[in-house]
Image (cartoon, rainbow, N blue to C red):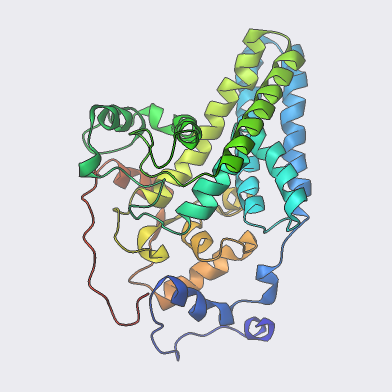
Amino acid sequence: MRGAMRRTVSTSNLETPPVGAVRYVEALCPLLPADAFRPVPARLSVLFLHLGVVLAGYWITRLAPPFFLPVITLIMGHSMACIGFLAHELSHNSIVTHRQFRYLFELLFWGLILIPPTVWRRVHNHTHHLQTNTLGDPDRSFTVEERSRLTRWYTRIFYPYKSSFRWNPLVLLHLIPYIGRNVVSAFYPGGSKPACVPNKPAYTSRERRYVALELVIIACFQIGIFWSVGTWWHFFWVSPAAYAVTSAVVMAYIFTNHFLNPVSATHDQLLNTTTVSVNPWLDRIHHHFSHHTEHHLFPGMNSDFYPRVSRLLEELYPDRYHRLSIGKAWQMLWNRKQFDEVPQREPPVVGKL
């Protein structure tokens, strides 16, 4: 595989590759170097660098004049978003593969941004990635069958769609209720769930105990933050306000990565996800989180190789691969329906899994 990428990759003489969730990977793997699939433990230093920025923000906040607090909040919130992007990679084994060490790092970094790692793993790794934008996906849009007073108000407040308040800024805060609804749903018995949760993964009793312990640890983090800054006024700027900035950065990607694609009956990473293009330097700072289709194909890949995968997808699957500017994607979000139609099971297609 390494030699294949030392040469200039040409796809012009290849037969049209088969489609389907697994077969995309089968077609792409021979065109990618082995280095793309190796973990990058050096990313831990970047995680701790952003953690240092956040810790410095707690200290500076106590000394800074009031007019400077929003600036500190913006810097801290952005670093917390970057921690989220890298914790996302960490949870997919692309940074640390040792299970116990990985969990400790997840507990630290996910906990800083109020996410219990066990909930993240069940919702994101074990369910969302296996059923992307299908009825079984906890992260999908609501369907017309799920219309209720709660889902109408929830989408009206937190989702971008055609007949909502145009450019509603609250949609950028959706990470907060998103985490809250999935945490609450983890403690619902059996298969029951709140109406505002599209789908709930199954939790064992052991996993629920882990979630409860992680919530206690997260609460201790917040108590420690309050103790470090000393007043409720300063705590507001370094925790709730900073987390709102984090949510805005993260949701700018998540809405455009998934909500442009209607709920589908088939798990197909190319048809059910969207990659957005952003400024190249910003893409590097955010560790290519914009390349979301590429991530769904290769969740454990070194994200530095996602732009290369993007070029291959444009050559091999130009009619299936969705890539557009983030500005255009946001404009399109405000033209979508409030509720998706219930997908009909598609007839089997030759070559499709």
- Residue 106 or 250: which is nearer the viewer? 106
Left or right, 11 with respect to 54, comes to left
Residue 197 percent across, percent down from the top left: 38, 38
In the displayed image of the protein, which residue is found farthest to the bottom? Answer: 13
Residue 228 percent across, percent down from the top left: 76, 16
- Classify 247 as above or below 339: above
Left or right, 124 with respect to 60, comes to left
- Residue 260 or 38: which is nearer the viewer? 38
Q: Is residue 79 visible?
A: no
Quadrant the N terminus occupies: bottom right
- Residue 346 or 300: which is nearer the viewer? 346
- Classify 314 as above or below 228: below
Q: Would you identify the image quadrant in which residue 151 lies? A: top left
- Classify 338 as above or below 150: below
Which residue is located at x 73 percent, y 54 percent? 99
Q: Would you identify the image quadrant in which residue 299 lies? A: bottom right
Which residue is located at x 23 percent, y 38 percent? 162
Quadrant the C terminus occupies: bottom left
Q: Would you identify the image quadrant in which residue 52 lies? A: top right
**Number of numbered tags placed on the structure image:** 0
Residue 314 percent across, percent down from the top left: 43, 71
